[in-house]
Image (cartoon, rainbow, N blue to C red):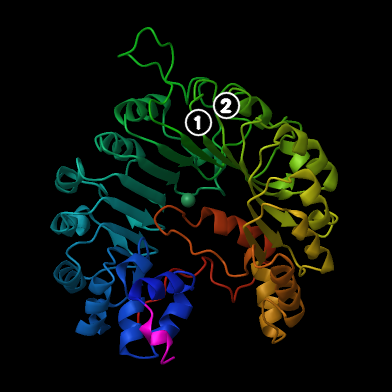
Amino acid sequence: MDQLEGLPPEVWVHVFSFLSTKEKHTVRLCCRSMKRLVDHPCLWKNHTVVLSDLRRYTYGFWDTLNHRKLTRVAVRHLRRKEWRRLVKFLPSLTAMVFMDGERTYREKYLDSLAHFPDLREFGVRNVTWDEAMLGRSVNAQLTERLTHLSVCNVRLTCTVNFINTVALLVNLKFLLFHQEGKAYWPHRVRPVPGSVFHHMLLNLKKLEHLSWGMRGEPPQPLPNDYFSPTDPEQPGVPQYGGPALTSLELFNYPESILPENALKSLTSLRSLMVRYSYIREGIKCRLKSWLSPLQQLETLTIIGDNTLSSYTTTLPSSITRLTLRVGITLKDMDLIAPSIPGLKHLDIEQNRSSGSLCRRIPMLFPQLRTLRIRFLRREPERDLLNILQLQHLERLELMVDRLFIHQEHFNKHKWPSPRVQELIDQLRRLSNYRISITTEMRQRNLLRECDCEIDWIVRKQEPPCPALPSRPPLRSSPNPP
Ligand SMILES: [Zn+2]
């Protein structure tokens, strides 16, 4: 250590950049100089800190946050005094997300947002509002300021009013709106009406990312032009081309309500995620025809319960990043591989019936730079070493599902097990340390990623158990000590 202390601080900071948040917190305990280095702002960029019961935090805690220049927070609920503390100690807040506040809120609850002049990103999850959520006073403060808005599973007094208010946030680049769930009363599901949705789309001229979702199946199909409004300002252009829209997420839009040509005018899309809750028997999946006009598509994510071939095996050749949270067979992989020869990033699940993906992937996708495999209900085996054949691979992520972790925890095993760790060490050595391998779950961006996807994984993989919480616990960067 005596010799190492002579290293320039930049080198230390670079070394620390390879550590997880947990490891960085361990480094802080070494000595004062390490603590100072590991709190360098560039190591905490874009971290979101989860705050609860703000009265218990000391001045030292707030100093640490400010030293790290942390300006993103997630909170469950703020009492009036806690709002005041936050305004006092973190006035430079840029992003805030409210999660799972178990009470009913009124319009004035968000008035304090006006005290954060740098606030650009705002999110709300799993709560009830019994007055307008973005009322007139809040909206006056945020109209020009907000660039990111994320609202998932929030009970609103009037969805139409809310969307009309969102249409005024002219600088929005990112919008996530997943309607509150009424899955048990499908006839009560009311999608945002086409005219209201169109008004919002046409007003938000800077919108780059739209995540649009609902729970349950509305009784009536949506109009054919739901995602293609006519733009009155451009009479020569027959339909909305999404001036800046390059990324779309469709959450739970069943086949029965969106037509085959639903995305025909969104030709500028570079990223598409489709999450299916189910495919009704007898109705053909429309994903193939949704994809056909998207010739610039680079990123595709398909999430659903069926095997890949139930959705499509025809993909645009421009795709370089593919995420499949669906049942995979080796035959499906053989079918899709020739259509996407330039694939560089793959995120996939290994289930019991899919055969050895590790053996097949290097043959089918030799250009891969990153690979993420989630192993369902079993650990990786020796065939993992086949990954070495991927000559351009830089990063490998190995995951197991939550159920596996639960079981192994009760059996006093840990992930990765010594056997898997040995395989990983072998892979590292044999690749001459070219491949960086991780087994830790990536941290969720709490503002951009809601609970919908996690709910889906939990529903799919975990048996109902009254002892388990209905929602996953808050997960983010742990609070600094
Ligand atoms: Zn959601």
Q: Secondary structure at mark 1?
A: loop
Q: Residue at x 53, y 45 (%)?
A: 215
Mark 1 sits near ligand 1, with its Cβ under 8 Å away: no
375, above or below 335, in the image? below
Q: Is residue 4 magenta?
A: yes
Residue 461, quarter of the rendered image: bottom right
Helix, strand or loop at label 2? It is loop
Q: Quadrant of the C terminus?
A: bottom left
Q: Which residues fall within the magenta stretch?
A: 1-7
Please give the name of the residue rendered at 59% of the width and 24% of the height, measured from the top-left corner.
259
**Disc 1 and disc 2: Cα gap in Å?**
6 Å
Mark toward the start of the polypeptide (1 vs 2): 1
Residue 445 shows up from this direction? yes
Looking at the image, which residue sits at the far top? 236
Position of residue 9 relative to residue 194, above or below, is below
Whether residue 21 appears in magenta in the rendering, the answer is no
**Image location (x, y in percent) of residue 236:** 38, 7
Query: Viewed as shown, does residue 449 lie left or right of 174?
Result: right
Instruction: Tell whether 480 sits left or right of 60.
Output: right
Q: Quadrant of residue 32?
A: bottom left
Q: Which mark is residue 126?
A: none
Spot occupied by residue 381 in the image (x, y as percentages of width and height): 81, 68
Residue 81, quarter of picture: bottom left
Read off the residue under disc 1: 269
The x, y position of residue 435, in whole percent, is 65, 63
- Dot 2 corresponds to which residue? 294
